[in-house]
Image (cartoon, grey):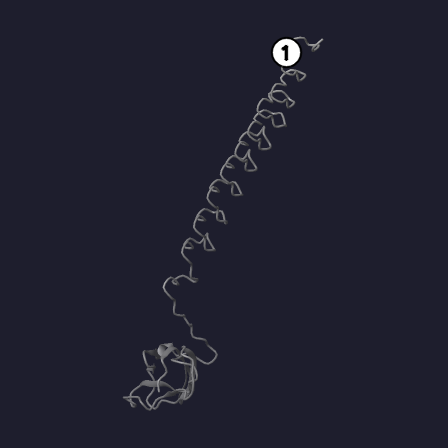
Amino acid sequence: MKVFRVLQVSVIRVSESPLVLSIRAEGLAATSGWTNPRLDNSVDPNPDDSVLEFSFDADKPSGISLPQLTPIMACIDFEPSNGADAVIVSARINSITVHAAEFIKPGEQRPQPTTLAIGEEEPTTQALGEESPQQATTLAYGEEEPRLTTQALGEEEPQPTTYAVGEEGPQQPTTYAVGEESPQQPTTYAVGEESPQQTTLALGEEEPTTKAVGEEGPTTMAIGEEGSPFGRY
């Protein structure tokens, strides 16, 4: 049975008189497990002409096989009776023709252009964003500029790190909490700490020490002591 596809055929002109050709075919079997690969000339519809036709055959697996395309290769040394203008090797879905001008001599290697997928027209396949030769790697979204790292939201400028909201200026290396917007306030003051003094003044603590209600003077006077500074006689 024919293999699934023939990929490549090379023909070596081993000798001229008599003419001997060494034909090698490489292809793909439909599954794993195919054996006894061969090039069969018995199916040539015109065996007396100078166009040599071969069927790329192999024995299909009799047991369990993997459903995957599997490389397979076959070779044959052939002595044509009426010369050779071309060699055709056929598989199940395609065939390849090698003309006499493409036959090679022993020791030579035929140029083997590989089948390039869409986008492989150049020597290497470049991913989206690699179209220019200056970009040897695929740049993620936001890497279109020459810088090689992707900058997060807020990194659009040359600053190397991502600043949180409020860090946009280079003068603010850290993120200040609410109330820290001024660089003169290195710490966050609680409600009532707006002045530079470092203690928290409760309601009525406008002076540096805490005085209870009615202690606005230096001493606490009971009700009726508001008069003489010496108290009662």
Amino acid at the residue labelled 1: Glu
Instruction: Residue at 62% x, 22% y: name it.
Output: 212
Residue under the point 36% across and 77% down: 101
In percent of width and height, residue 147 lies at 49, 47
Would you name the residue on which mark 1 appears?
A: 226
Q: Where is residue 169 in the image (x, y as percent from the top left)?
A: 51, 34
Question: What x and y, as percent, mark residue 161?
Answer: 53, 43
Q: Which of 142 and 78 is in front in this view?
A: 142
152 and 36: which one is in front?
152
Residue at the spot 36% in from the left edge and 64% down from the top edge:
118
In this rendering, is residue 98 above or below 36? above
Task: Report helix, strand or loop for mark 1.
Answer: loop
Measuring 32% from the left and 81% from the top, which residue is drawn there? 92
* Picture coordinates of residue 206, whole percent (x, y): 60, 20
Say which quadrant the N terminus sits in.
bottom left
Quick one: quadrant of the C terminus?
top right
